Amino acid sequence: MKQRSFKEERKEMVEAQLISRGIKDPLVLNAFYKVPREKFVPSEQRDESYSDFPLPIGEEQTISQPYIVALMTEALRLKGEEKVLEIGTGSGYQAAIIAEIVKEVYSVERIAILAQRAKKILKELSYQNIKIKIGDGTKGWREFSPYDAIIVTAAAPKPPQSLIKQLAISGRLIVPVGNLYSQELILYEKRRGRLRTTNFGGCRFVPLKGEEGWK
């Protein structure tokens, strides 16, 4: 029996895991059709690249389940011209998905080995619109703020104030908020003087470590 190509697996993943669960945004779906997830997965896990669960990438970190990546991306309601901040580069996969949609992506990763690996993969895939730095993601990346959208790919006890400050008016921040064992995926929308919240339900992420996260 002929083994399926990664391209075929990618198409099936989009249809079975994303569209069937209600992901509708054509920009998001198109990004998932294009980005080769297998490039961001450790070689020993490559056969599981398009499976419906998170995978370990080393350093006690994971590449999130495809559906969660899609849900978080769609929640930001990106149109194409935005400047986006990502907290927790990890494998680089989420940054690549967003970079297919928007103008600029800035990503902060505290673990140097992951940041360097992600940079290498993204360079090999010819992404020109992603900048990565090593640092405390809970403090954001003030130099390029304000951001139209911020995505946090690790669990915080509460949304870091530095990130809220770096969000543009009408900007959107999505972050898993809760304890170390279970969280809710919350979208914060910055209106003048207040934050509007939308709860996207339960989730489970690795902890966001840093000055404004878990110590």
Image (tube, helix red, strand yellow):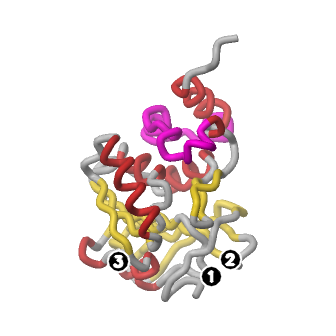
Q: Earlier in the sequence, mark 3 or mark 1?
A: 1
Question: What residue did someone put label 1 on?
Answer: 157
Left or right of residue 45, residue 168 in this image? left
Instruction: Return the disc, 1 or 2, that comes first in the chain's sequence.
Output: 1
Check disc 3 and report the residue beneath it. Answer: 166
Report the amino acid beneath label 3.
Gln
Q: Earlier in the sequence, mark 2 or mark 3?
A: 3
Is any part of residue 37 visible from this angle?
yes
Compute the Cα span from label 2 to label 3: 22 Å
Is 160 above or below relative to 121? below
- Residue under numbered circle 2: 178
Residue in front for this viewpoint, 19 or 86: 86
Depth check: 169 or 49 in front? 49
Label 1 with label 2: CB-CB less than 8 Å: yes
Compared to residue 95, the image places residue 163 above or below, namely below
Instruction: Tell me the amino acid under the disc marked 1.
Output: Pro
* Mark 1 and mark 2: Cα distance apart in space: 5 Å
Tell whether position 204 is magenta: no
Residue at image position (56%, 75%) is 208
Give the quadrant of residue 172.
bottom left
Residue range highlighted in magenta: 18-46
Rendering coords of residue 187 (x, y %): 54, 66
Residue drawn at x 44%, y 75% is 137
Residue 18 visible in the displayed image: no
Q: Quadrant of residue 3?
A: top right
Alpha carbon distance from label 3 to label 1? 19 Å
What SS does tag 2 mark? strand
Q: SS of the residue at dot 1?
A: loop
Amino acid carrying mark 2 in the image: Gly
Question: What is the x, y in percent for residue 164?
Answer: 42, 79
Q: Quadrant of residue 144?
A: bottom left
Query: What residue sits 51% from the left and 40% below the top?
Result: 37
